[in-house]
Amino acid sequence: MITYNHKNGNVSLHTPTNMPKACGFLWNKNMMIQMNCRGFATAQFMQPEPAKYAHGPALEAKTFMQPEHAYFSHHPGRFFYIKDNLTDELFSLPYEPVKQVPSTFEFIASQHQVSWEVEHLNLRCKLSLTLATEDTAELWQLSVENLLQTKRDISVYSYFPVGYMSWMNQSAKFESTLNAILCHSITPYQKVDQYFVQQDFKDTTVFLSDVAPDSYETRQSVFEGEGGLHNPTGISNNRLENKPAHYQTPAAIMQFNRQLEPNGEVTHNANQAAEFKFVFAPVKDTQEANELKNRYLAHSLQFTEVQNDYKHYLNRENGCLSLSSSNPKLDNFINHWLPRQVFYHGDVNRLSTDPQTRNYLQDAMGMIYINPNKAKIAFETALAQQHHNGEMPDGILLHPESELKYINQIPHTDHCVWLVICIEAYLNETADFEFLNQSIGFSDSEDKLSVMEHINLALEFLYSQRDHRGLNFINQGDWCDPMNMVGYKGIGVSSWLTLASAYTMKLWAGICQQMANDCHAASSTSNNAVKFIKLAAELNDAVIEHCWDGEWFARGITDAGNCFGVSSDIEGRIYLNPQSFAMLSGATDNEKWSLMQPQIKQQLQTPYGMMMLAPAYTHMHEDVGRLTQKFPGTGENGSVYNHAGAFYIYALFERGETEQAFELLQTMIAAEDIQNELTRGQLPIFIPNYYRGAYFQYPDEAGKSSQLFNTGTVAWVYRIIIEQLCGLKGCKQGLKIQPQLPKQWPSLDVSRQFRGATLDISIKRSKDVNCQHVLIDGEVLEANNAGEHIMSISPNKTYQETNIEQVSTTYKVPKTYKVIVLFPEN
């Protein structure tokens, strides 16, 4: 059902019906498209806010991408009909709308394109989609080849529904000079000021062909007629009607008649295959459509050039690690698809002009391992929008015309936490401690302070936002957006935020101590290290006193003074996040862990990963909020919410619980068998934000993928694999080598890019050693006083080489090290 090409990472699905929601996605700086294996599409572009150029049958409200997106017969898509004119037999590509099961079917998700190879009625059809690198434009190619030894008479019909564009003004026409259908609309407005903003909108959708059609239709309802989309009335006629759409719902429908020569017959001008190229894009006007025509369809080689350029765009930011283990499925995902998803998040910020601060910072954390300089710019951008009192905003504005929208208009309390967690990862990877001395301003003040002072303010702000018990106020939500009624009266508190604050302060204290160890550091830095360790201990103690329920930590205390996420609760009895961050912050000692671990596993673990909470809520709890209104097992209401699961896996590795951590990591990434794959219904080319949970309440629905690839999970998973599983974590002195391989892996080969050097690492179990041994280019690397093996690698080191003429040249060149790591079998 699913096959893998481990050389290039391609993943293929060989059925259109067993996993009907399986999809791939492509993006550039201006747009994104999620392409379904059956031909449905969800696409948007920026102008500067997200907008659509193909719409549903009704004018949808503006909203962000939704999980578990539903498809229906008139959903936007990209389709082609193929008709045998001698037999009147009909099928469609890729599968919808005719839904004729083909002889063979292959949906191929590649790094730079989405494609299909379908055989039916003795025709071999190859269909592919790629994007332009700079323009908002879909580039489509179609080839239809005759497999019979007899001549064929076929018609090919494009069917790109543009949908209900505007109640105010919509139309469509064919432009013969362009071989194009242009679907025009006007975005409605009410306020006069909106007109001046919208007058430059790309309100026209164009469908361009490299060859002239034999006929066309622009009216969706006329084409569909009484036959329905599975057998359109328009196709039953010999020709389409060549009519414009005057306010009717428009569609880009072209008919191409082709005579195909017998297969294998070589004659003068023999044509055994019909080939087409198309561009589908939003444009401002006909002139812009003409520019796209000249850019992509003026000569036959342009598509190949554009495809290579787009491939280069996606490959220019590769991951810093590749591995070869005993699990090739896992290798394929880690080597090819995980860094791609990490790059998507850091490259385009989920196609938002006001990403949530927590998302923006964690997405930047992932970019640390792909392009550290880009991550640094993101941290600078975020810090420049900090308030002078230390508070971080709910969203980061990335465009002069953008404003805080939707969830970013609701006050949340966790954003300061992520500054330290993400910047600490940056410092580890780069050793760029000079960044902490960089001067940056504020959003509400003319003052400029160093990054270090910015972070001190953020932590002091966190510490100041506590109640009489010493617990952090939750306001209308912390990391969990829809937990909006726990503390909206200004009284409720969050145990998770308190623990996360403690963890953050512990991390920052370590950084301050490193700075203090530098002879040039001020004594105040050392004092800060002591201060933040003390504050972290206070916060941990407050949570232990007020939120330890005997076998796990409660989630918080409501405005009404009710402790929730405790054993006496019928619903929402246990939450995962407080347990994870109690492990990270130090609030969990060995005794508590012995009590917590079996409860976490028994109540929250499923074959698809860790549920965020259990049991899922079945009705509104007004002291918790809209989280409880979500259907049980979806979103934050008890799903296998992978972002939370990643926190727990990270905490397990930090605690040395390697086997359990790896089990959950592997479960998150790859299905263990075909039935598990079918249940998820997703190709293993991205990690979704969740799989359905409520495992014990709705077992038949559990495990279904949300199909939503926007998630903070991937930055954490990439970090986990690099720093914990492979044990190749940066530090100020160099690279700390401490792999945590599961027992089922006897060895692991890794290539790691780090500070301009390449490390080819062979990790092996050996019966000849009783502790870890490390050899660098054959030389033993001695452990330090703490028992750590740290390989000294300077950032951007300049190496000196001498050529055959004995001339010494100094220049920056990647250095390659051969590293062998041996550790005991047991």
Image: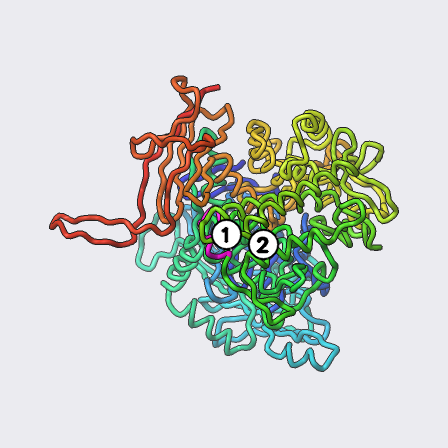
Q: Amino acid at mark 2?
A: Leu
In the picture, measured across the screen, residue 287 lies left or right of residue 753, that is right
As helix, strand or loop, the secondary structure at mark 2 comes to helix
In the picture, measured across the screen, residue 725 lies left or right of residue 416, that is left
Residue 819 location (% of width, % of height): 35, 34
The part of the image, by quadrant, that contains residue 410 is bottom right
Instruction: Please report whichever mark, 1 or 2, sits nearer to the chain's N-terminal start.
Output: 2
Residue 340 location (% of width, % of height): 49, 49
Query: Between 308 and 432, which is closer to the camera in this rendering?
Result: 432
Q: Amino acid at mark 1?
A: Met
- Up-down relation of residue 142 to residue 597 (above or below): below
Residue linked to disc 1: 367
- Up-down relation of residue 593 to residue 803 (above or below): above
Q: How is the image coloured?
A: rainbow
Residue linked to disc 2: 361
Q: Is residue 152 visible?
A: no
Residue 413 location (% of width, % of height): 71, 54
Residue 134 location (% of width, % of height): 47, 65
As helix, strand or loop, the secondary structure at mark 1 comes to helix
Q: CA distance from mark 1 to mark 2?
A: 10 Å
First to last magenta residue range: 427-436
The part of the image, by quadrant, that contains residue 589 is top right
Q: Is residue 272 visible?
A: yes
